[in-house]
Image: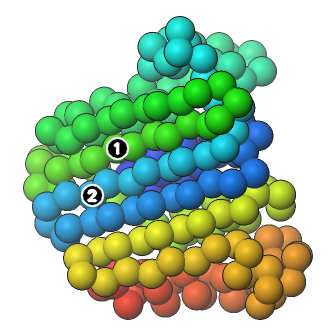
Amino acid sequence: MRTIADHILDICQNAVDAGASQIKLSIEEIPGERFSFVVEDNGKGIPEEKLKEILDPFYTEKKKKVKFGLGLPMLKFASESTGGSFSIQSKPGVGTKVSATFNLSNIDCQPVGDLASAIFSAITMEAGVNWQIVRVKGQNGYSLTTEELKKILGDDFYSNPMKMKKIMELLNMMENSLGG
């Protein structure tokens, strides 16, 4: 993963893969100092005994030929190598919360990347998921939900090319209004 936005999208994909119907993505940035994000979902959750296993790069629950999952271990390494932090909390049948903080001034910190595209990819990856996005940068921010998008654009906002273009334009406009 080259950017923090890539990590965000990976964790969002994990939440969708866990069967979540409600996902909240919170992103807070203090320019030049700190970047943090939290992904909270109501997916199937992870048993306590598996929480340590999932941070092993050779462990995965996904059905694929290559049996390793690097997303969470890479996120943990990337955030902690900047002097930041990583945490995961989960309960079976309740959901999972993944948090990461990066010290932006650390030489080992990855670039933030294209947040508008990461958010767009997340909210359009699965039709049955209700997303809540909260983004704060410095003293400014925005929030949106897929429920709001459905009311304005209709239920096919995630698959209609013209509506998808409008959402991408909106996200770019909101990110640009934050100075990024």
Query: Residue tagged by mark 2?
Result: 35
User: Where the N terminus falls, by quadrant?
Assistant: top left
The residue nearer to you, when weighing 112 against 16, is: 16
Q: Secondary structure at mark 1?
A: strand
Q: Residues within 10 Å of mark 2 (few under 14, many from 20)?
A: many
Residue 60 disc label: none
In three-dimensional space, the C-alpha distance between marks 1 and 2, rounded to whole angstroms, equals 8 Å
Residue 39 falls left or right of residue 44: left
Query: Compared to 159, does 16 lie above or below?
Result: above
Which residue occupies 56% across, 57% down?
Answer: 24
Q: Position of residue 22 (x, y in %)?
A: 69, 54
Q: Position of residue 76 (x, y in %)?
A: 35, 31
- Examine the image and state in which quarter residue 157 appears: bottom right
The residue nearer to you, when weighing 132 against 156, is: 132
Q: Is residue 164 visible?
A: no
- Type of the residue with mark 2: Phe
Query: Compared to 44, does 41 lie above or below?
Result: below
Q: Position of residue 73 (x, y in %)?
A: 42, 26
Which residue occupies 77% across, 21% down?
Answer: 63
Q: Position of residue 134 (x, y in %)?
A: 47, 69
- Examine the image and state in which quarter residue 66 appears: top right
Query: Residue tagged by mark 1?
Result: 100
- Examine the image and state in which quarter residue 23 appears: bottom right
Residue 83 falls left or right of residue 27: left
- Type of the residue with mark 1: Ala
The residue nearer to you, when weighing 91 against 78, is: 91
Which residue occupies 14% across, 66% down?
Answer: 32
